[in-house]
Amino acid sequence: ETAEQHAAFEARIARGDKIEPGDWMPAEYRRQLIRMISQHAHSEVVGMLPEGEWISSAPSLRRKLILMAKVQDEAGHGQYLYHAAETLGVDRRELVDALLAGRAKYSSIFNYPTRNWADVGMIGWLVDGAAIRNQTMLAGCSYGPYSRAMVRICSEETFHHKQGKEMIVAYARGSSEQRVMAQDALNRWWWPSVMMLGPHDADSPNSGALSKWGVKLKSNDAVRQEFLNEHVPELLEAGLSIPDPDLHRNEAGDWTHGPIDWSEFWAIIRGERGLGRERLATRQAAHDDGAWVRAAMLTYSERQRAQAAD
Ligand code: 3HC
């Protein structure tokens, strides 16, 4: 990689060009995008598990239909994102093998248990709310296939977010039992949602390269601030209390959280706490169950190729 190539690449980034799969790019740019996009794809696929287990226990047909549609959307997001990663020259089987072998990360948020139906609403409101803030930022990123995937994903996430908020607001205004369930879900999902947007900027080793090359247009803390400023007023408006005694508005009017327990964050990511092991075991079982489908598709495509060659 010559200095001229880097200079030309950075001039393209500065101009706001979209970098496309066949374009020259620094090896580190490619590596960072493969790391980030594959983790994003893994997060979508593993993210189907916490909510999927509640589809059969939905309290009404309407809630069941909404949740089925949401979980199917997450599967589709995973497919877009594995495909976006493949445009960088990596094979999706390699990515999935890394996930199943515990060598690839996915979002910490999905290693928390869903204890009851109110969790489905809180995940929609908080987790999809955080994801929308992050993914709206990424929709402007310099890598073409990733930014275009984000545009499509964000439009579907908006529906996920709205349905979760509608559900929790209804419970917060409902019976005392529903109010208790909504508050309990907030108590368990608040801090994991604040943490899912990544370590503080000072502890974010990937942010330098990602920001320099126009992938991360806002820092982890900036996206977290957007998340707080949007969700704190709405949660308080719904009559819920936020489990952070230090939460306050600073002079600039920004909601400011108390200290984050990053030891929990890393323990959850390493699978030492939470459901990491169970999530990977479930993914491994699904992968094994689907082996015959992959074999059949491979045989079919080889036969198609042979017939086309005749
Ligand atoms: N969970 C697991 N690992 C995390 C994490 C999280 N929430 N946040 C950070 N990390 C990891 C990073 O991957 C990195 O480890 P690595 O170098 O081994 O990959 C390390 O912690 C240091 O963090 P950095 O801030 O340096 O990492 P990034 O610059 O990559 O920033 C990020 C982290 C903001 C999550 C960024 O990767 C990102 O924007 N990723 C794309 C979006 C994404 O993956 N979202 C996940 C949720 S998807 C979702 O919510 C689906 C929706 O439909 C519900």
Image (cartoon, grey):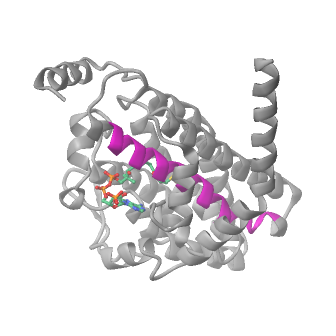
Question: Quadrant where the N terminus lies?
Answer: top left
Q: Is residue 8 magenta?
A: no
Query: At 67% from the left edge and 51% from the top edge, which residue is drawn?
Result: 163
Which residue is more in the foreground, 146 or 309? Answer: 309
Q: Which residue lies most toward the right here?
A: 61
Which residue is more in the foreground, 128 or 165? Answer: 128
Corner quadrant of residue 45: bottom right
Which residue is more in the foreground, 13 or 134? Answer: 13
Q: Which residue lies most toward the left here?
A: 3
Q: Percent from the top left, x then y, of residue 252?
A: 21, 50
Q: Which residue lies most toward the bottom here?
A: 272
Q: Which residue lies most toward the front here?
A: 310
Which residue is more in the foreground, 281 or 153? Answer: 281
Query: At 47% from the left edge and 77% from the top edge, which residue is drawn?
Result: 271
Q: Please tell me whether residue 92 is drawn above or below residue 88 in the rendered image.
A: below
Question: Quadrant where the C terminus lies?
Answer: top right
From this viewpoint, is residue 168 visible?
A: no
Q: Percent from the top left, x then y, of residue 33?
A: 38, 41
Q: Is residue 45 magenta?
A: yes
Q: Find ligand 1 in the image and state its quadrant.
A: bottom left
Q: Percent from the top left, x then y, of residue 147?
A: 45, 31
Image check: 55 left or right of 149? right
Q: Percent from the top left, x then y, of residue 117?
A: 71, 70
Q: Please tell me whether residue 234 is drawn above or below residue 186 in the rendered image.
A: above
Main secondary structure of the magenta stretch: helix
User: Which residues are the magenta region?
Assistant: 30-55
Q: How many marks?
A: 0
Query: At 59% from the left edge and 49% from the top edge, which residue is drawn?
Result: 161
From this viewpoint, is residue 34 visible?
A: yes
